Amino acid sequence: MSVIEVTNGGPWGDWAWPEMCPDGFFASGFSLKVEPRQGIPGDDTALNGIRLHCARGQADLNAHVVESQSGRWGWWSEPLWCPVGGFLVAFSLRVEAPVTFGDNTAANNVRFLCSDGTELQGPGLTWGDFGNWSELCPKGICGLQTKIQQPQGLLDDTAINDALFFCCRN
């Protein structure tokens, strides 16, 4: 097993527990938990969670869902899937750089690359920029770990700041 990561993650929070697909399963789809724009004077958090939909071969209907720790705000999207038989093999994070005075959101969106070259962009928000792509998994992504800031009370919340993914070989 190996790890793929990116370098533009947000600075806040702690790494949660890793969550893995069952043995022999790979992520063929994903969904995101996203808090919509809150307007003034709301506190935006944007990306709050990432779920991997793990499948065996073409068994999308029997997918097993795994999720590392998620934030409390927002709603889950419908899954986005690689073309039949494909798996997620790389990712890129959209992250808003820290601002000194103002509302920080950290991670806003995720995009994944499928094994056939298809690019899937999540339905996250648009603050910040997508960073570089991670390295490629040889076979496919089989687990994830999120870096999440716990609720800050009356202070500025960011929820998901960063993520990394695990590659399995069989």
Image: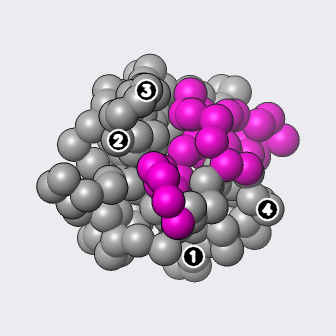
Task: Examine the rendering and report whether any part of residue 28 can be seen.
Answer: no
Residue that label 3 marks: 39
What is the secondary structure assignment of the residue under circle 1? strand
Q: The magenta stretch spans which residues? A: 100-129
In the depicted structure, whether residue 119 falls above or below residue 66: above
Magenta span includes 96: no
Task: Examine the rendering and report whether any part of residue 74 can be seen.
Answer: yes
Sooner in the amino-acid sequence: mark 3 or mark 1: 1
Q: Marks 4 and 1, how far apart in space?
A: 16 Å
Q: Marks 3 and 2, how far apart in space?
A: 8 Å
- Would residue 4 be found to the left or right of residue 117 on screen? left
Sooner in the amino-acid sequence: mark 4 or mark 1: 1
What is the secondary structure assignment of the residue under circle 2? loop
**Mark 1 Cα shell of 10 Å, populated few (<14), some (14-19), many (≥20):** some
Q: Position of residue 8 (x, y in %)?
A: 66, 68
**The disc label shown at residue 105, or none:** none
In the depicted structure, whether residue 136 falls above or below residue 75: below
Kindly indicate whether the residue at mark 4 contacts the one at mark 3 (C-beta within 8 angstroms).
Answer: no
Sooner in the amino-acid sequence: mark 2 or mark 4: 2
Nearer to the camera, 82 or 23: 82
Location of residue 61 by image quarter: top left
Residue that label 1 marks: 3
Residue that label 4 marks: 132
- Would residue 124 be found to the left or right of residue 75 on screen? right
